[in-house]
Image (cartoon, grey):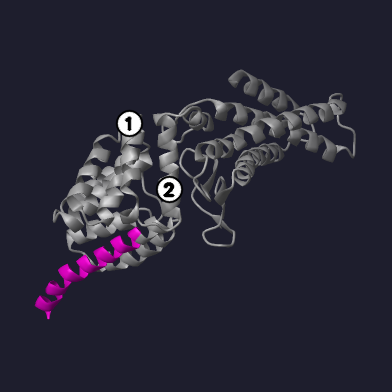
Amino acid sequence: MGAALGGGIAYWAISASRPPYLGSMVLALLWLGLALVLTIVIHEGGHWVGSRYADLQCLTVAVLWLYLERPEQRWQLRLKKRRLGSLGHVTAIPRGFERLRQRMAIFIAGGPAASLLVGLLALALGWVLRQPYQGGLAPGRTAGYLGAELLFLVGTGSVFIGVLNLLPFTMAQGTVSDGERLRRLRRPGPAADQEVNRWHLATLAHQGLRPRDWPTELLARLLATAGAPAQLCEAHIYNYAHHLDCADIAAARHYLHAAYAGSAASSPAVRRSLACELAYLAVVHDGQPAQAAQRYQEAQQILPFKDNEACFIQALVACDAGDWAAARRLLPVCELEARKVASVGLRAQGLNRVQELHALVRQRSEPVAETLD
């Protein structure tokens, strides 16, 4: 695959050294960038078609930093941070849970299928349309030549992405290929059950069911069917969220520490999130605020924060330092970030956590204010 892609790029590079590219590297890079975007659009468009065919409700179609989202009833176009380890993704939830494994497979397979079908067609058409220009570019035929070049680039990229995504692998950032997901769903068993249970639980959360109302039998199945360490870590996280929302702090603490202990195989984003949760539990529920700064440094080393990602743990650190003014400034930012969570159930839990921190700041800062008066 690498050799085929390298050969295709080398063949294009030879063409790029001749007019109309010659003397305009900007045009060559622009065409390469446009081909990349179209390649991603074709793949994610295949997932979208698969979601429609499988009777799923599509929530997000993302291409690089461009997000088409439907948080409520209407689609919205937004610029957001690209998901780590991914050039694009599609999020969809089932309208019902009948034949869920088969429907998931259709949704997942839609991306590679579109990449291969459209890619092969574009590659063949681009190859044919490029032949008249091999002897040189006649005046007035630039548009046709550039169109043939674009088809050739899109075809090469799409075929590569289609074949690559059919291979079963998991990236260091935690991104799982379409082929790996299809492999897990291939036959009934723990791997398929784990995928179905995860999607079932995520769907309930998207539909507004708070973690405290998640079915306990579904959470137990998620733990029982976890095979890989990363899956077990994720199952512990779901159970942590459930028991935390039930105010069962002892059980929540147990599952959080279990998730943290087994997080070595998880993505950096997951490991950073667990460090932040340990800081939250220490400050709000365990009365050990001194851990906040330590966990903040740990989280920052795992994966540096960007924009307002660190606002909640920074508020915890401010509480640790007794900087109540800084904590108050950060809390409205935390609330805005919590409202951006797509999952309605998790969004409600997140807003409650911000309110808890509001109450903690008032409780600890008011005695100081009275002394000063």
**Residue ID for mark 1:** 229
Q: Looking at this rendering, what residue extends furthest in the front direction?
A: 98
Q: Is residue 188 above or below residue 239?
A: above
- Mark sitting on residue 108: none
Q: Residue furthest left?
A: 371
How many marks on residues? 2
For the N terminus, the quadrant is top right
Quadrant (top left/top right/bottom left/bottom right) for the C terminus: bottom left
Task: Assign a secondary structure to mark 2.
Answer: helix
In the rendered image, residue 361 lying in the magenta stretch gets the answer yes
Q: Is residue 145 above or below residue 342?
A: above
Tell whether label 1 touches label 2 (CB within 8 Å): no
Q: Which residue is mark 2?
A: 202
Disc 2 vs disc 1: which is toward the camera? 2
- Helix, strand or loop at mark 1: helix
Q: Depth check: 199 or 284 in front?
A: 199
Badge 2, how many Cα within 10 Å: few under 14, some, many 20+?
some
Amino acid type, callout 2: Ala
